[in-house]
Amino acid sequence: MSTSPIREFERSLHRVDATSSVVEPDGFDAALADAVEEPAVGAPLPFEDLSLADHPVALDPSPRELREARTGVTGSRLGIASLGTVAVESRAGGDELTALFPEYHVVVLRSSDVRPDLRSAFAWLADEFDAGRDSLVFETGPSATGDMGALVQGVHGPEAIHVLLVDDE
Amino acid sequence: MSETGADADRIRHLLAAEGDQIKANTRLFNEERYAQIDDVGSERHERYRTRAREIKEDAIDRLPDLIERTRASVEHNGGTVYVADDAADAREYVAEVAADADAERVVKSKSMTTEEIDLNEALEASGLDVWETDLGEFVIQVAEESPSHIVGPSLHKSREEITALFEERFDPDESLDSAQALTAFAREFLGERIEAADVGITGANFVLAESGSIALVTNEGNARKCASVPDTHVAVAGIEKIIPSVEELHPFAELIARSATGQAIPQYLSLLSPPVETPAVDFDRPDEPGFGGSDAERDFHLVLIDNGRTEMREDDDLRETLYCIRCGACANSCANFQSVGGHAFGGETYTGGIATGWEAGVEGLDAAAEFNDLCTGCSRCVDACPVKIDIPWINTVVRDRINRGKDPEIEDKLVDGLVPDEEESGTPLRKRFFGNFETVAKLGSATAPVSNAVASLTAVRRALDAGLGIDVRRELPAFERETLVEWADGRTTVADPERRVVLYPDVYTNYVQPERGKAAVRTLEALGCAVTVPDVGGSGRAPLSQGMIATARSKAEHLAADLGAHLDAGRDVVVVEPSALAMFRREYEKLLPADEYERLDEGSYEVFQYVYGLLENGADPDALTAGDGSGVAYHSHCQQRTLGLEAHTVAVLEDLGYDVLTSDVECCGMAGSFGYKSEYYELSVDVGESLADQFEDTDRTVVASGTSCTDQLEALLATETRHPIQLVAP
C-alpha cells in the first residue's frame, strides 16, 4: 500500500471516534494551546524537546485537580496505524491517571513512533519489556459501554480523544 | 411435575422474558465478528487461531513450570502469588489481604473467576462494602441476579428494565430514561466508590509468566481504575490463564475482541506488571499535590485458582476446556443460546457452549447436567472458537458421563433386551430410544405403512410423549417400505464408468428419504459414475447425539470396516446426509484408530462436493436438470457449513442456472432428535422461526441438505422441502 502510516493512523483514529492533527515541532506549543481545554492536568512528556511547562496544565496534580480537570495531557511513544491505538504508560508522573480521569484525553505523539500494525507494536513491546518498561495500556478510542441498552461513549474513561502528531521526520 | 415438564416451563419463561434481548445482542456480536474476520481476512484470522491453539496446548502442557515461573517473576517485581486449591481457599486469602489492608470498601472489575468462587458474598460476609464497577456487572449486582453471558453479564436486560431497576433502587432526582442518563448515573455513583476504595480487585485475561504481568481486556476503563486508584490490587485468575511471555500474547490480542464482540481491538488492552509505577491516588487528601501524596507502598497479590483445573488438565477430554479465553463466541454463534441465553444455557457460573466443560470441571457433573442437553452438536461454535476447542465433543463426553451417573431405572431391563447398544444400565430410556433410532427405523420400515399409521394415532402419540417425552406437536418421520438399499439391490449401473462410487445409505436416507438417495444415484450415474449402495449400518450419529459414546464407537468401527473394503477396492464414498459426513470428518477422529479415520476421511465426499468435482473435471452438466433461472431458497446444514461445504452446493446450483438465495442463520434448531423432545419443542420452533422468516414469503423452491433441517422447514413453512440433489437429478 502506498498510503503513509500517518495518513492511515489518522483514518483509523477517525474510525474509532478520535480526532487528530499533525504539526511541525515549532508549531507544537500553539497547537497544544488550541487543543487543551482548561482546567487541565498532565504528565511530563517523555520527549526531550517537547514540554508542558509553558502551558496551563497542572503536573503532579492534587486529587481534586485530577477529578475536576476537563483535559488530561499525556505523551505516548507508540501509535498503531492500522488500529488508531496509542500507548499509555504506567509512569511515576501519573500518565495512566491523567489519561483516564478527565473526560478529554489529549495525546502527544511523534510521527516517527507510529508503527504499522499490532504485530509491529508487539515487536516494540518485546524490546520495552526487555528494558523493564513493562506496564502500559493500549488505548483505542474513547471508553465505551453497551451495557445500558445502547452504545455510550465516556464511561469510566474519557469520552473524547485528540491525538496531536508531531511530525519529526 | 416431571423433570421434563419443569424444564419446559423454565425454557418457555426464558424465551418470553429474556429471549428478545439475548437474540438481538448475541446476533449483533455475531454479525460484527463475521464483519471483522472479513476485514482482517479469513486466512490471517486462521493463522492466529492456529498459533493461539499451539500456545495454549504448550502452556497447559507445562503448566506447573509456568506457575513457578510466574511466582518467581511476580515476587521479583515486589508482588505476592498465592495458588489457591479451591474456592474456599481463594476466598479466605482475598479476605485476609483486605483485612491486612484495613479495608472497608472493595471495588471490582468484571471477572468470571471471582463469580466462580463466589467472592463477593464472602467479602460482604466479612463486613466489606463491595461494588462491581463494570456497568453490566453493576446492573446484575443491583438486580441481585446472575450473569447471563460470559462477556455481557446483563445482556438479557432491556434499557427500560434497567431504568425501572435503577429508579426503584436509587430514587434519582432526574429520570434515567436513556442509555446516556443511565451511564452518567452509574459513572458518578461508581466513580465515588472507586475513589473511596481501599482494595481494587480485577481478573486477568492472561498472565505472562516471564515478566509477571497480567493482561486485562476492557472497554469501559473500570479495570484500569480498580488497578490504579487503590494502593492494594488483587488480581484473581485461573491457573490456565498463564502463557509464557508477552511474545505469546500477540495472537490473543488479535483474536480476543474480534471473537467476543466483533471489535478489531478492545478500547483498553492493559498490560500491567504490578506493583506499577503509577502513583496510587489518595482522595482523602484532595488538595495535596502528587495525587494526594500517598506514602503507602503499592501492594499486589496475584491469586491463581486451581479449583479443579489440575484434574481437568489430566482429563484427556476436558483438557481442551482450559484453552478457553472466555470470549463468549461459542454462545453468540449458538442458535439455542441466541433464543434462551445463559440463564437456561449455563450452570453455576459459566454460560454457553464451553460452559459444559467448565461446569463439569469446576462444579461437577450435576451442574453441567442442568443444561448440557441444550447443545445439539450442530458445531457452529467450532469455527467461532478462537482457540479451536472442539466444544461439541466436550458436550458429548460430559453427556456420556452424566448418562452413566444416573441411577439405573427399572425400564433398563426391558430396554437392554430390545436395543443392540453398548450402554451401561442407567442411561436414560429416552436417550436410548433416540440413540437406537436405527433399530426403530428398521422396524418401522419393515412394517410400513402400518407403523406410520400406528405412530400417528393419538393414543400412541400420547404414550410416546408420556413415556419418552416426544412432543405430540411434532410430526414424526414416516418410514418407507422399500429402503434405498433394497431399491438399489441388483440394479444395473453404468458400464465402463469414469469413476466408481459407493453411495452411503445413512439411516434417514435409507429408511425415511430414499428418494433423495435415488436422486443422488441418478445424478452420479448421469455424470458417468458406477454407483453401488451397500447394505451397511448407521454412522453412529444418533447414539453420539445422546452421549452414548460406546455405542457410537461400535457403529463407527463396523462402518469403517465395511466402507474401508470399498475404498480399498478403489471406490469413492459419497454421503447425502451432512451429519453422517461430519461423523466421518470430525468425530471418527475421536472414535477410530488414526489410520482407519484417515482412510475414510480422505475417501469420502458430500454429494454436491463430489458433483462439483466431477463437473470441474469435465463431466457434462447438460446431463443434469437445468434451473433455467428458477428460484431456489437453500438452507445448508450446520455441520456441512462447519466443514466448509456449503459453497459446493451453491456453486453447482448456480452453474446449472438456478437463482439461489441462501439462509444466513446459524442453525434451524432441529439437529436430529432435539426438536422432537417435549421440553425443547418450543425452543426449536423459536430457533427455526428466523429461518422461516427468511424463507416464508418466497415463491422459490425450498431445499435443505440435512434431514432434520428438512423436517423443521416442512413443519414451519408447511411446504414440501427436498434435498437439492432432487432438483438437479435427471
Image: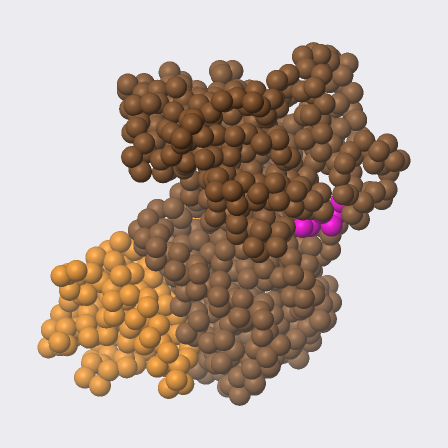
Chain colours: A orange, B brown
**Is residue B142 depicted above or below B76 in this figure?**
above
Q: Is B82 or B504 nearer to us in this picture?
A: B504
Q: Position of residue B497 (x, y in %)?
A: 40, 32
Magenta-colored stretch includes residue A163: no
In the picture, the quarter occupied by the C terminus of chain B is top left
Instruction: State the quadrant of the N terminus of chain B.
Output: top right
Q: What is the quadrant of residue A42 in the picture? A: bottom left
- Residue depicted at x 69% and y 50%: B398
Vertical placement of residue B654 versus B148, above or below: above
Which residue is pictured at 25% across the width and 59% down the height?
A13
Image quadrant in which you'd find residue B156:
top right
- Magenta segment range? B397-403
Front position in the image: B38 or B260: B38
Asked whether B398 falls inside the magenta stretch, the response is yes
Q: Is residue B40 visible?
A: yes
Residue B92: image location, x then y, percent: 72, 71
User: Percent from the top left, x then y, of residue B93?
Assistant: 69, 74
Q: Against B530, is B56 above or below?
A: below
As drawn, which residue projects farthest toward the front?
B496
Give left or right: position of B367 versus B263: right
Establish if B261 lies above or below B649: below
Label total for image: 0
What's the residue at 31%, 38% (across, down)? B617
Q: Position of residue B453 (x, y in %)?
A: 69, 11
Which residue is nearer to you in this view: B78 or B439?
Answer: B439
Q: Main secondary structure of the magenta part?
A: helix
Q: Tell me: B347 left or right of B708.
A: right
Residue A42 in view: no
Left or right, B34 with reference to B77? left
Question: At x 62% / y 72%, what residue is drawn?
Answer: B304
Residue nearest the observer in this picture, B128 or B702: B702
